[in-house]
Every structure is written in structure tokens, then in C-alpha cells.
Amino acid sequence: MDLEQFAALRTPEGSAALDAAARVAGGDPLTAAAALRSAGVPAGLAAAALTQAELRRRAAGKFGPAASGMFLTRAGLEQATRGVVARRRAERLRGAGVATLADLGCGLGADALAAARAGIRVYGVEADPLTAAMAAANAEAAGLADLFTVECGDATAFDVTRVDGVFCDPARRKAGTGRRIFDPNAYSPPWDFVTGLAERVPHTVVKVAPGLDHALIPAGAEAEWVSVDGDLVEAALWCGALAEVPRRATLLREKEGPVTAVQLTGSGDAEAPVGRPRRFLYDPDPAVVRAHLVAELAGELDATLADPSIAYLYGDEARPTPFARCLEITDVLPFSLKRLRALLRERRVGRVEILKRGSALEPEKLRRDLKLAGDEAASLVLTRVAGAPTVLICRPLPA
């Protein structure tokens, strides 16, 4: 899509095309396109409307009902913050006293809209003209144009003395190709500018990829990893007055009932004790693992590692915790395909869940090689114990 096509979508004819596209989206694209053309929608407008309808359908998982009125690009949707995460971040900023915020590289406006809903005045800056126009349209559609305004320009040129807080989500995909950028120095804005914001603005938050190398975390910053319903979705650096602890893992649940949040904090450099496998295995949430807080969780559970480099914890009791899934271990075996296949056949196991850490085995290939048959189920954990390839046969416990 280009600016001319986007402008066409903003006309009464474009609105009608979007409504028609929404009614046929999700099915066969050729059939949907034919339906719009038969209704008299020009081909170019029909294509743009159908693209928006499909993106809005996908965006519902991130933004909920608000997605139905948003303007989106594929790249912008992929990098946009989930609504539940953006709301929590906005609440924390507002709680810290931030009243004016610069969103440098605001994209489609997901974070800025959440901040505006929290009562914060947001100044968005976006380098891409189409994305900037869409962000402004999203603010208008949400009824927040008085609190969130957008300018198309260079984020590094924005006068940050105008605000008391900055949020920056640097682009981590290459313009034109959409390919992921793994070198922070190639982000846009560049990494040195992003990390330097904390020295210029008292309240600075930087959204980063969950795989961020801990060595890149600026001194004194709080690094937080966030998961939603068990999926690791992002990491953020809270700098200046916003930094409260060295490391934080935040687990959000939104699938059932009201959104809930639990947090685990710590230094990020503690080491958990190592011992033998015990009766129960704890599989920590990925936010806990990436935040390097497995040792803190081990202390809460009176648990140990069986290998210092693998984040499975073992305990003698099944202690309730929101930070890990618990399984009961029935067998600990040195890995042998022949022996494992025989044991599962003997127990009539026909369905297995396969988890792994520290193993090069491919779960789906192993599943085929096991030639399962039977009406029983089990969980297999492929891992290492004291450096040796090991398989644990387990049964999950109720949540």
C-alpha cells in the first residue's frame, strides 16, 4: 500500500469497501476479491481493503475489538506491542509520574494509544510516511487525537526536553525486505542513540527483542522480560528513575477471566544449586529463564538443577507456583531409543508430549521413531543430567 491507496481508504467509498471486505475476510482470497469487484469496488481499492481486513482479523489477538477500526501494515503489526503489555507499561509510566511522553519510532501507535488512554500526552515520531499517517488515523479512530499526535520525521532529531518521559521501540526489521535485524547497532534509531536517551530524559523505556544479550543491558537499567499466557513476547529496559530492580520477569495471563500479572525479581547473576533429579520437575516460564532468574525460583521452590546449564528445576515436593509448570517424574533413563521405545510399548503409551532443553534431538522425528501404540499418555523430557543425554518420563500435574 502507498499513501494514495491509504487516502482512498479514508474516503466514504473506502469506508464502504472496508466494511464489505470485513464481511468476506478469512475465506478464499480470490472469492473475496471477486465479491468486492461484483459489488462495484475498483480493483485497487478492493485489494487495499481486503489487505486491511485480513490484517485486522490477525490483529484481534493483539488488540482485541479495537483492531476492527485500526489501519495496519504487515511489518507494523508484527512489531506492535500486544494490548495487554502496552496497557501495563502505560500504567507503570503513569504511576511513575510521567505526564508527557515521546514515542520515538511509534510505528502504528500501539504503545502510544495505550499511554494516551492512561491520560499521558504523547508525541509520536515515525520515519515512514505511510506508517505515520496510519498512526494518526488510529489515534483519530480511538478518539485520542487530542492526546496522541504524530509527526513524520527522524526520531533522533526530536527535542526530548519537551517531555518528561521517552519510549523507544527501534525498528528491528530491514526496510523493504522485512528481514529481522539481530545486530542492535543496525537498529533504527541506532543502539547508541537509544541507550543514550537515559542520560537525557529522567524516565526512559526501551523495547527490545526477547533474545537481547545481557551484556548489552546498560549499567543501572532494569531489564524486564514479559510473557503472555506462557509465550515470551518482549523485553524492555527501564532506565533512570524507572529502574527498580536489576532483572524482572512478568507473567501475564489473559486467556481466562480478568488479566492477571505476577512478577519475579532478582539480580540476574545468582546461581542455583546442582544435584540429582528428584521426584518433581519444574519447567520455568520462558520469561523467568530469559531474565536469568532461575536461581531465584529455585530458592522459592527448594529446588535444584541437574545440570548447571539447563533451566529445569527438580524438587521433592510439588509446590504451587505461577512461574513454572510442574511434572511428576516416573523414570530417569540414559537416552536410548530402543530402550525408550520398549518401555513405552510395555506401558501402552500411544500419545506423548515431548519437551526438550539441552538436547539436539528433533521431537517430531523422535515421535515417528518411537512407533507409539496404545491408549495411555506420557510426557517425555529430553535433557542432560551432569552432561549426559537423558530422557525423563513424566506425568503432568494439575495447574
Image (cartoon, rainbow, N blue to C red):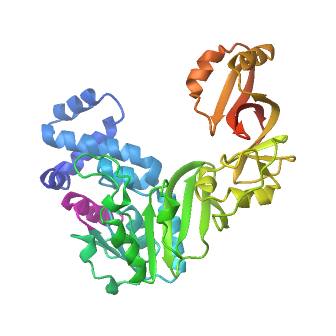
User: Dominant secondary structure of the magenta stretch?
Assistant: helix
Write the start and end of the magenta stretch as one range. 126-144
* Position of residue 386 in the picture relative to residue 47 (left or right): right
Give the camera-side residue of 351 and 50. Answer: 351
Give the camera-side residue of 378 and 257. Answer: 378
* Position of residue 56 in the picture relative to residue 263 (left or right): left
Q: Position of residue 376 (x, y in %)?
A: 76, 20
Outermost front residue: 387
Give the camera-side residue of 89 and 212. Answer: 212
Task: Specify whether residue 174 is in view.
Answer: yes
Give the camera-side residue of 74 and 147. Answer: 74
Residue 167 vertical position relative to residue 8 in the rendered view, above or below: below
Is-magenta flag for residue 137? yes
Quarter location, residue 37: top left
Q: Residue at 33%, 38% (x, y): give it.
A: 23
Residue 167 vertical position relative to residue 212 in the rendered view, above or below: below
Q: Residue at 77%, 32% (x, y): give it.
A: 394
- Image quarter hosting the C terminus: top right
Q: Position of residue 309 (x, y in %)?
A: 65, 48
Q: Position of residue 120 (x, y in %)?
A: 42, 77
Task: Specify whether residue 108 is in view.
Answer: no
Is-magenta flag for residue 291? no
